[in-house]
Image: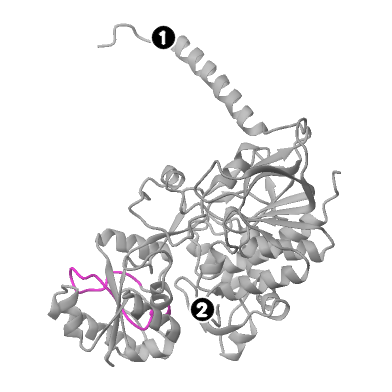
């Protein structure tokens, strides 16, 4: 029993006092070091880029080509971040490859697809720029970098095939060409250099950073402090925080360590948090995407995503408990991931030899069969027995799927049937198990269309730019497949050019 009631006046007084205390803490957290007293600059460059994925490398190339001196730092022992291990899918609208294959597309259609998937939470101005500049960014990758793209594919949530896949079905095709271009320009990625904090002057301008040189991932005491002066600007391209379990469960408590991630181990959020400490604004931090095409039978990203996403529209996804379909196979990533999680156990995706030979890159199939994540069976009965699927409901569902394929229309879930799909029935049959993994953080720092990071007063933080997954708002609630590559390169290039054009502070 409460013996003494709190009076309203005392309550309000307490709230006010607490509010002042919180405001004071917030101010201290956001102010950052406002003086360079005691700091001895060890190195300098016009533009300092943090991160070596698509966005960071694009920014570095454009800054260098704009006449700036450039440094690129990377905390991991190898460059490339998530970009070097992604599936090499680049979404772009109105391209030559689309026209060659009779696909009618436009930036406006791509934008409408992004907005629909993003539940209309997207920052439309930035999403529009990605769509309008996607074709140019792809051509830049092909004509300037020399990257090779071999096929046009379809991803769930897009209206038409607009995903251009690299020849190797890997983002390494583009990252390696970017690294080679930077080396040709006289810039090397400086590895094992972990960003620690931003340095600001008394006016709040970002004038440099502190790093730990010789950092060993996982040992936060490793390395020695080095201060790098950024005479014009810093570009933050540090990626998302899918591997930071503590951070991601703050924003989405479901995403505990029980959910693996497709990301490389260094996809942690400390660089983003440092930007927040100096007053940057964030957005959509609790919209964290799970890849519905991931498999529990392999670590990280693996090969199953490159198999499953290629055969959507050619083969059904089945609930092994019932033998029935339960979701639109060509729906966006959130639709599919949420539906699988509700099933509560891994589901299966099945395709026959016709679909697999037509859609899946041979090296992907070979690697997936070798690591055991892709299985091969001679009959549907074998499939049912292996995965404990009720046989008759399963066979009936395959027959129903085949009827939809034959007429080109799915009456149950409105899956987009592949234009050259055939009824499933040509053995051998290939099967993968699917269970979502944490894949992409839609949330991040608020930026304007020049890639400048905005503060809590909606004004640019002088000398600070951001691009790639660390930049939030563009994708809204759900990022469509292949659009990350476009986003990173489009805004990486913008950030690099803008940073190089800043007036030097020193």
Mark 2 burial class by Cα count in 10 Å: few <14, some 14-19, many 20+: many
Identify the mark at residue 169; answer none if there is no mark: 2
Disc 1 is placed on an element classified as loop
Q: Residue furthest top?
A: 4
**Which quadrant of the rendered structure holds the C terminus?**
top right
Q: Quadrant of residue 398?
A: bottom left
Left/right placement of residue 183 relative to residue 367 reads right
Q: Are marks 1 and 2 in contact (CB under 8 Å)?
A: no
Which residue is denoted by mark 1 in the rendering?
7
Residue at mark 1 to residue at mark 2: CA–CA distance? 67 Å
Of residues 290 and 129, the one nearer the viewer is: 290
Residue 416 visible somewhere in the drawing: no
The overriding secondary structure of the stretch rendered in magenta is loop
Query: Is residue 302 visible to us here?
Result: yes
Q: Residue 123: image x %, image y %?
A: 60, 55
At mark 2, the secondary structure is: loop
User: Depth check: 496 or 48 in front?
Assistant: 48
At horizontal 53% and vertical 48% (from top left) the residue drawn is 269
Residue drawn at (65%, 37%) of the image: 278
Q: Which residues are magenta?
A: 310-328
Tag nearer the camera, 1 or 2:
2
- Residue 307, picture quadrant: bottom left
């Amino acid at each position: 029993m409460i013996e003494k009631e709190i009076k309203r006046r005392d309550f309000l007084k307490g709230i006010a006092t607490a509010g002042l205390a919180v405001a004071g803490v917030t101010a201290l957290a956001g102010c950052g070091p406002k003086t360079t007293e005691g700091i001895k600059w060890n190195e300098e460059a016009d533009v300092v880029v943090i991160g070596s994925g698509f966005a960071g490398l694009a920014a570095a190339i454009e800054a260098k080509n704009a006449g700036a001196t450039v440094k690129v730092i990377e905390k991991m022992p190898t460059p490339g971040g998530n970009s070097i291990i992604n599936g090499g899918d680049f979404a772009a609208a109105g391209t030559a490859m689309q026209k060659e294959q009779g696909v009618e597309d436009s930036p406006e259609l791509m934008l409408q697809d992004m907005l629909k998937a993003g539940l209309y939470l997207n920052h439309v101005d930035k999403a529009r720029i990605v769509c309008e500049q996607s074709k140019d960014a792809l051509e830049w990758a092909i004509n300037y970098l020399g990257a090779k793209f071999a096929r046009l594919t379809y991803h769930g949530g897009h209206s038409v095939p607009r995903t251009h896949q690299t020849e190797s079905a890997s983002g390494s095709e583009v990252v390696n060409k970017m690294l080679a271009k930077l080396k040709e320009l006289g810039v090397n990625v400086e590895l094992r250099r972990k960003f620690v904090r931003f340095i600001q002057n008394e006016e709040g301008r970002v004038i440099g950073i502190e790093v730990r040189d010789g950092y060993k991932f996982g040992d936060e005491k490793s390395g020695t402090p080095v201060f790098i002066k950024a005479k014009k600007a810093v570009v933050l391209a540090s990626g998302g925080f899918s591997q930071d379990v503590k951070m991601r469960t703050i924003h989405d408590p479901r995403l505990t360590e029980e959910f693996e991630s497709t990301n490389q181990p260094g996809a942690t959020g400390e660089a983003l948090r440092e930007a927040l400490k100096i007053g940057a604004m964030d957005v959509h931090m609790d919209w964290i995407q799970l890849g519905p095409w991931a498999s529990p039978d392999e670590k990280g990203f693996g090969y199953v995503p490159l198999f499953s996403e290629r055969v959507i529209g050619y083969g059904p996804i089945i609930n092994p408990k019932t033998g029935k379909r339960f979701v639109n196979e060509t729906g966006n990533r959130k639709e599919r991931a949420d539906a699988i999680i509700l099933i509560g156990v891994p589901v299966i995706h099945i395709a026959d030899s016709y679909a697999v030979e037509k859609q899946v890159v041979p090296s992907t199939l070979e690697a997936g069969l070798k690591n055991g994540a892709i299985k091969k069976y001679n009959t549907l009965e074998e499939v049912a027995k292996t995965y404990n699927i009720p046989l008759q409901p399963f066979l009936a569902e395959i027959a129903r799927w085949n009827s939809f394929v034959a007429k080109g229309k799915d009456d149950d879930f409105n899956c987009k049937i592949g234009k050259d799909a055939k009824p499933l029935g040509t053995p051998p049959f290939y099967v993968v198990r699917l269970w979502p993994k944490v894949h992409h953080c839609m949330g991040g720092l608020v930026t304007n269309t020049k890639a400048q990071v905005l503060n809590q007063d909606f004004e640019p933080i002088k000398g600070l730019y951001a691009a790639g997954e660390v930049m939030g708002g563009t994708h809204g609630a759900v990022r469509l497949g292949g659009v990350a590559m476009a986003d990173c390169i489009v805004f990486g290039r913008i950030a690099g050019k803008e940073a190089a054009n800043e007036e030097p502070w020193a």
